[in-house]
């Protein structure tokens, strides 16, 4: 995360502490502000564009906050009041939850040109290896920069830069998309950048090795867009970036 982004989050946190939840305002905006005011600042609101499921979770959070204030949102014990009322705030991770590795190629972006449909697909599959396992934020930044460099070497820097912006916007672990950072694990909006315990890191590496031994080609972009239409809708600004990338690719 850049220093400017950190500064904006710090300012937002301070502002929210002075202006707690006020009934009647947008439920998702309020819920994100409450999280910040209670010390749970994230790089992006887990309530995204306030689709129905996000709106429902936001309202649940506001109900807990209205009853118990910040105290109702900071109990991280698995059997505590917060986890009972708002289980999405305190996910417990185990090796058993890890799903087999799959790659969707470049997710919501084409894997190549009309003439060569998989021209930079391998760049995205390697990027997926990192996203599947997850880990601290620094690893995500390194994976995104690696994707940018790989695509730039194969095509041009304009496309590489757009796709880099796209994965920074759309790949956050804060939102429940199937391509998010750490997608091999259960969705965890609060601790999406957790450091993996050794046994979990080893399990992820083993699944990636199994895929490398027997790779399965990703679905075509048309299938992915149909499958993930709802996920695109929950990420602010993602559809606009998809359109920009598509426009650049049509010129290649």
Image (spheres, helix red, strand yellow):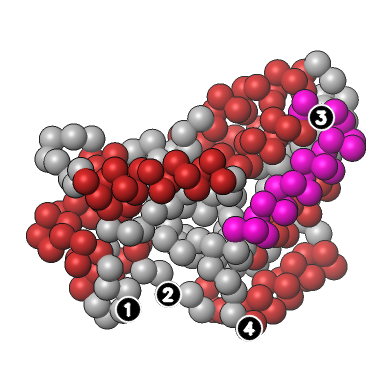
Pick the quarter of the image with the C terminus: top right
What distance separates the C-alpha of mark 3 from that of mark 1? 46 Å
Crowd around label 3: few <14 · some 14–19 · many ≥20 (10 Å): some
Asked whether 172 falls inside the magenta stretch, the response is: no
Tag shown at residue 92: 2
- Can you identify the residue that label 3 sits on? 157
Q: Is residue 113 above or below residue 180?
A: above
Numbered badge on residue 53: none
Q: Secondary structure at mark 1?
A: loop
| N-terminal-most mark, 3 or 1 | 1
Residue 37 appears in view: yes
What range of the chain is rendered magenta? 137-159
Residue 199's disc is 4
Q: Which sits earlier in the primary sequence, circle 4 or circle 2?
A: 2
Give SS at disc 3: helix
Please check the rendered image and state whether residue 139 is part of the magenta-colored stretch, yes or no: yes
Mark closer to the observer (3, 4): 3
* Disc nearest the viewer among 3 and 1: 3
Determine the CA span between mark 3 and mark 4.
38 Å
Q: CA distance from mark 3 to mark 2?
A: 40 Å
Closest to the observer, 80 or 252:
80
Who comes first in sequence, dot 1 or dot 2? 1
User: Which of the 4 image quadrants contains residue 86?
Assistant: bottom left
Secondary structure of the residue carrying numbered label 2? loop
Visible residue check, residue 47:
no
Name the mark on residue 78.
Answer: 1
Secondary structure beneath dot 4 equals helix
Residue contact between numbered discs 1 and 2, judged by CB atoms under 8 Å: yes
Q: Residue at x 34, y 49 (%)?
A: 13
Give the percent coordinates (x, y) of residue 94: 51, 78
How many marks can you see? 4
- Magenta residues: mostly which secondary structure? helix
């Amino acid at each position: 995360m850049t220093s400017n982004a950190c500064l904006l989050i710090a300012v937002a946190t301070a502002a929210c502490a002075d202006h707690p939840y006020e009934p009647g305002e947008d439920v998702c905006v309020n819920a994100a502000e409450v999280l910040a005011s209670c010390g749970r600042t994230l790089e992006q609101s887990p309530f995204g564009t306030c689709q129905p499921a996000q709106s429902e979770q936001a309202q649940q959070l506001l109900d807990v906050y209205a009853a118990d204030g910040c105290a109702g949102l900071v109990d991280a014990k698995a059997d505590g009041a917060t986890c009972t009322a708002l289980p999405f705030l305190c996910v417990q991770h185990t090796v058993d939850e890890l799903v087999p590795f799959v790659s969707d190629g470049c997710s919501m972006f084409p894997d190549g040109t009309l003439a060569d449909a998989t021209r930079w697909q391998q760049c995205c599959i390697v990027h997926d290896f990192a996203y599947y396992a997850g880990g601290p934020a620094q690893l995500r930044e390194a994976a995104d920069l690696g994707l940018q460099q790989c695509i730039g070497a194969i095509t041009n820097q304009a496309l590489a830069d757009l796709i880099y912006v796209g994965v920074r916007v759309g790949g956050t672990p804060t939102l429940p998309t199937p391509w998010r950072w750490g997608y091999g694990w259960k969705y965890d909006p609060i601790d999406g950048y957790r450091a993996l315990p050794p046994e979990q890191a080893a399990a992820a590496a083993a699944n990636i090795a199994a895929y490398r031994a027997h790779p399965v080609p990703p679905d075509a972009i048309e299938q992915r867009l149909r499958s993930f239409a709802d996920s695109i809708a929950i990420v602010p600004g993602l559809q606009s970036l998809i359109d920009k990338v598509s426009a650049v690719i049509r010129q290649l």
